[in-house]
Amino acid sequence: MSKDSESNKISRRNFLGKAGTGIVGSTILISSIGAADKTGPDLAEAPPIDPKETDILNLWVNGKKQKLKINPSSTLAEVLRNKLNLTGTKIVCNQGACGGCTVVMDNKAVYACHMLALDAAGKKVVTIEGLLEGEELNHLQEAFIEKDGLQCGFCTPGQIMSAYALLLSKPNPNREDIMEAMSGNICRCGAYPNILDSVLLAVQNKN
Amino acid sequence: MKDFNYIQPDSLSQAGKYLSNRNNDAVILSGGTDLLSLIKENIYTNENVVNLKTIPNLNNIKYKKGEGLTIGALTKISDVAESKIIKEKFTVLAEAAKEIASLQLRNMGTVGGNICQRPRCWYYREDFDCIKKGGGECFAYQGENKYHCIIGGGPCYIVHPSDLAVALTALDAKVKLFFDDSSRIIPIHEFFILPEDDYLFENILRDGEIVTEIIIPDLPDGAKSSYIKIKERETWDFAVVSAAAVISKKGSNIKSGKIAYGGVAPIPWTEEIINKSLKNLNADKNEIEKISKIILADAEPLEKNKYKVILAKNLVKRILTNLVLDA
């Protein structure tokens, strides 16, 4: 195949690059074969466009205004992780049941894996990365370290974001308040007692 | 998740027109907490998803003494759970709202979406060509039916999953529906339908029809209400059995009352014979015992859910005791 395709000035790499763009790509491919003998713009070098990224999303993430081109069926968690590289937000169950993807949107905890990114249009989203104060960890993060509020740590960003949302609405929660507000976050290691202690310590340190 | 287009209408009229055109193959998106599950599991494969959240005036709670309460269909469930007037006056509704899923989902899910959510039956949710999905039979009938209905079933044996619907039934709520640029208001018991009438759907909504508001008549001063939900774990679970009760008292007697049950039938269930027997009842321990014995008298449990009958009877005893005797 290589000789034939070289004579048509289409390399395997170019071919994949073009074909990978789907329906739009195939039209470009056909027209570029026809134009192969004449010199023209090398369309294969153009940045690949995902034709499914049809919608514009404007939102605030960690205080920064973002304008993104996204696939309308993307979840908020996918956009945070894949478009903004904010991989602290974990996709665990991917069905809005475990809390690993919890972020805070307009001051309330939500499951980022189970909402469409477009539903966050115009909203203010805070992820675990947004809790950093310069190079300093947030007092909640410090408390989780001090009280060992984790074992494997995979649920921790979600746990901390739930706690963060709770403290926004209720700065002095008691044990029961914390248990209730964080019951949508599952810890498979079962570090619950230490998670509770961590949040209580954060409350105490803040006061 | 399968790809779809996100349609953003500016008004109810626009949304209704788009949704009622069958060529558009469209589905309503409100909070999305159930819809996204249905799309992720390939149960819904619609090409277009129509977001209602930015349509104005669908997200509010209003109370007027003597008239009652109205709740916009796009109101978040957490706003119902935390509303001062609902907690004080329509306690059963606030308690039901607080029992739903987890805080994150209550912050996302809406009242309208909650009453329109699809059943949790595992044959429906998983890869079975069951009757509700247009297949030939209900696999729960002779299969794994621990969580299925004990009354009102056939040919499909789901239970209705909504907590709010049970509370709203006890409160004699009405549902406002928008269709073709006009609105109609129907009692909530006419909104839900049994599988014997239509096993493909749980309510009467037509293509393009949108739930816009819940209307709850005012309760007399001193009325008391409560919602108790039995679930297999403390949080984030659907009801095995639940009960909602609204009681008005006169002295030590119950003046009038209404009880609705969740987790027992394909619709929120209420029994006129029980509601009538609450009228002018001298509610002591014996009378409550008598009532709990006759509820769900026509129940026909399946092989693995006979426990639900006992659970429901005890739940009614508990909820009436709490409301009447421990007051």
Image (cartoon, coloured by chain):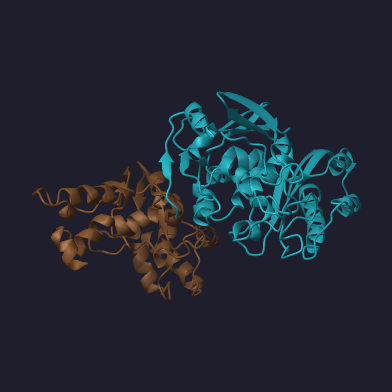
Which chain corresponds to the colour cyan? B
- The quarter of the picture where residue A9 lies is bottom left
Camera-side residue: B147 or B45? B45
Camera-side residue: B305 or B322? B305
Residue B193 location in percent, x, y? 72, 41
Residue B305 location in percent, x, y? 77, 63
* Horizontal side of residue B82 vs A164, given as left or right: right
| Furthest residue toward top | B182
Q: Residue at x 50, y 26 (%)?
A: B13
* Horizontal side of residue A47 vs B93, given as left or right: left
Camera-side residue: B6 or B171? B6
Q: Residue at x 43, y 57 (%)?
A: A113
Q: Colour of chain A?
A: brown
* Horizontal side of residue B92 vs B151, given as left or right: left
Q: Can residue B218 be spotted in the picture? A: no
Residue B78 location in percent, x, y? 53, 46
Residue A119 location in percent, x, y? 41, 44
Q: Which image quarter is the N terminus of chain B in? A: bottom left
Q: Can residue A199 be spotted in the picture? A: yes
